[in-house]
């Protein structure tokens, strides 16, 4: 078994990312349906055809707010709230089947969806989320940014004054200084995972043609998610919301936490971060898998054309 990695180097719409993910999901579902049709009694029995490889899709989107099922059920987003989020056409809004609350995607963030069969790996949904968190933590560590897990899904910055003897996968209690660097929201359907992580890499600057459109209010400038040095897409989008429904917490990115000299510039190419994350997901699956389950041997690249016909997105 190998881990396929599809990285989209250009900005894409959130809708296009869902189309790519749906194509990957359909491959997994079609295989399950074929197995069930040949052996309705035991759909997990062996077959002469090989199951689809687990696949990581990495990309960055135009400014987009998304909200998961949990938030919609507990706190429906009103039309006036949606109008605020999408005012002047500066950002889009989508309801998502993933878990998790309201969050934001934009240039400068690496979004990663992993489509995989949990039963094939012998991993529970809870352990899958933990695997993604730890894969992100090791990825951040590549750029010497120390992170931690908490009781809430996602990855948080580990401040220097905190206990450095804690192991990387330890759960520490959050305090007012904690800054979230990666949101995680996952959906599992028929044992197949989808959606995944939003890892903030750098506060990407606005192009000159759009800079005058993205204004910062005084309230935004008071937000700890706002960086007055860079004033980019991540500062703008996250300073407008309570990300992931966690009051009193802020959002940050690799370049802001020492992963680069300039918060508005990436510490490295986002594609390099994607490649490191792909490697860490492979290692994470192998660490978490059931004892008798097949290991993931390597990561290999696939092209967008392998999933969808050429589009103008």
Image (cartoon, helix red, strand yellow):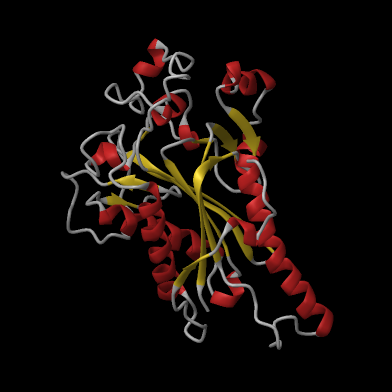
Place of residue 6 in the rendered image (x, y in percent of width and height, measured from the top left): 53, 58
Place of residue 280 in the rendered image (x, y in percent of width and height, measured from the top left): 38, 64
Whether residue 40 can be seen here: no
The front one of 51 and 72 is 51
> Does residue 85 sit above or below 251 in this rendering?
above
Count the numbered circles shown: 0
Q: Residue at x 65, y 67 (%)?
A: 191
Residue 25: quadrant of the picture: bottom right
Q: Residue at x 48, y 26 (%)?
A: 241
The front one of 140 and 48 is 48
Whether residue 177 can be seen here: yes
Q: Is residue 289 left or right of residue 22?
A: left
Place of residue 87 in the rendered image (x, y in percent of width and height, measured from the top left): 59, 17
Q: Residue at x 58, y 70 (%)?
A: 118
> Does residue 167 sit above or below 150 in this rendering?
below
Q: Is residue 79 left or right of residue 61?
A: right
Task: List the single residue furthest toward the top.
Answer: 218
Question: Where's the C terminus, which quadrant?
Answer: top right
Q: Is residue 281 left or right of residue 228?
A: right
Place of residue 200 in the rendered image (x, y in percent of width and height, measured from the top left): 39, 42
> Does residue 292 sit above or below 117 in this rendering?
below
Q: Residue at x 63, y 54 (%)?
A: 21
The front one of 284 and 62 is 62
């Amino acid at each position: 078994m190998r881990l396929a990695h599809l990285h989209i180097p250009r900005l894409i719409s959130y809708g296009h990312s869902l189309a790519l993910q749906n194509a990957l999901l359909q491959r997994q579902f079609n295989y399950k349906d074929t197995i069930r049709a040949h052996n309705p009694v035991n759909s997990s029995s062996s077959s002469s055809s090989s199951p689809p490889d687990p696949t990581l899709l990495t990309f960055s989107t135009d400014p987009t707010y998304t909200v998961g099922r949990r938030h919609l059920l507990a706190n429906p987003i009103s039309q006036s709230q949606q109008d605020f989020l999408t005012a002047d056409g500066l950002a889009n809004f989508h309801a998502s089947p993933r878990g998790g609350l309201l969050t934001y995607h934009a240039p400068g963030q690496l979004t990663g969806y992993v489509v995989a069969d949990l039963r094939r790996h012998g991993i529970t949904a809870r352990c899958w989320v933990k695997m993604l968190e730890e894969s992100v933590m090791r990825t951040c560590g590549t750029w010497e940014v120390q992170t931690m897990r908490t009781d809430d899904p996602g990855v948080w910055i580990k401040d220097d004054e905190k206990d450095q003897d804690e192991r990387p996968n330890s759960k520490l209690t959050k305090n007012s200084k904690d800054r979230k660097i990666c949101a995680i929201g996952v959906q599992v359907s028929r044992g197949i995972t989808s959606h995944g992580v939003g890892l903030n890499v750098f506060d990407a600057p606005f192009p000159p043609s759009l800079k005058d459109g993205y204004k910062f209010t005084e309230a935004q400038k008071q937000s700890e998610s706002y960086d007055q040095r860079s004033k980019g897409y991540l500062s703008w989008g996250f300073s407008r919301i309570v990300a992931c429904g966690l009051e009193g917490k802020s959002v940050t990115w690799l370049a802001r936490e020492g992963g680069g000299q300039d918060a508005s510039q990436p510490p490295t190419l986002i594609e390099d971060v994607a490649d490191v994350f792909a490697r860490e997901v492979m290692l994470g699956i192998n660490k978490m898998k059931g004892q008798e389950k097949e290991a993931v041997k390597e990561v290999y690249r696939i092209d967008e054309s392998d999933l969808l016909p050429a589009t103008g997105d």
